[in-house]
Amino acid sequence: MIMPSARVLKLADQIKVIVAEMLERRVKDPRLGFVTITDVRLTGDTRDATVFYTVFGEDADWSGTAAALQSATGLIRSQVGKQLGLRFTPTLTFVADAVPESARQIDELIAAAKASDDEVAKRAAGAEYAGESDPYKRPDEDDES
């Protein structure tokens, strides 16, 4: 994977700030939920920008926010173009960020593993050896017999 240039990374950060400010101040769509812009990925030629977002709320909030972002894309893109002053304004694509859902699933898996470890530790606490406590022969014991 090729690392993007410093210019592309800086433009992506600027786009992230511009989009977040637009959603906070200028976009007055009632379908828009409590949105957080988590990341912006810009192609190396700065033609396409993918804006990742999360929404605090239920599934209905997610779908309403997706529709609101889709309808406000033109307004947001024109503002990005004005503020960045680029020859070509990148196209914006809004994508729901899967990181929070993945993090929740990982937390659930960790909790299940911890519960399983606790169960094993509880069983091992009262366990006894099936044979001798030290089943290994020692060289000095062989000499004595």
Image (cartoon, rainbow, N blue to C red):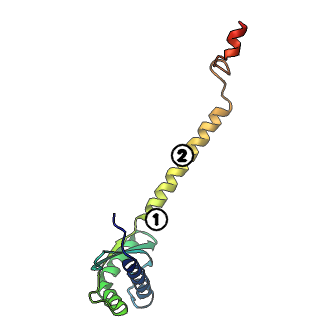
Q: Which residue is mark 2?
A: 113
Q: Mark 1 or mark 2: which comes first in sequence?
A: 1
Q: Position of residue 49 (x, y in %)?
A: 32, 77
Residue 65 lies left or right of residue 57; in this view the side is: left
What's the residue at 34%, 63% (across, down)? 1
From the viewer's side, name the closer residue of 48 and 100. 48
Quadrant of residue 27 within the rendered picture = bottom left
**Residue type, label 1:** Pro
From the viewer's side, name the closer residue of 72 and 49. 49
What's the residue at 41%, 88% (across, down)? 22
From the viewer's side, name the closer residue of 91 and 101. 91
Quadrant for the C terminus, please: top right
**Residue type, label 2:** Ala
Q: Which residue is mark 1?
A: 100
What's the residue at 36%, 78% (across, down)? 8
Q: Position of residue 5 (x, y in %)?
A: 37, 75
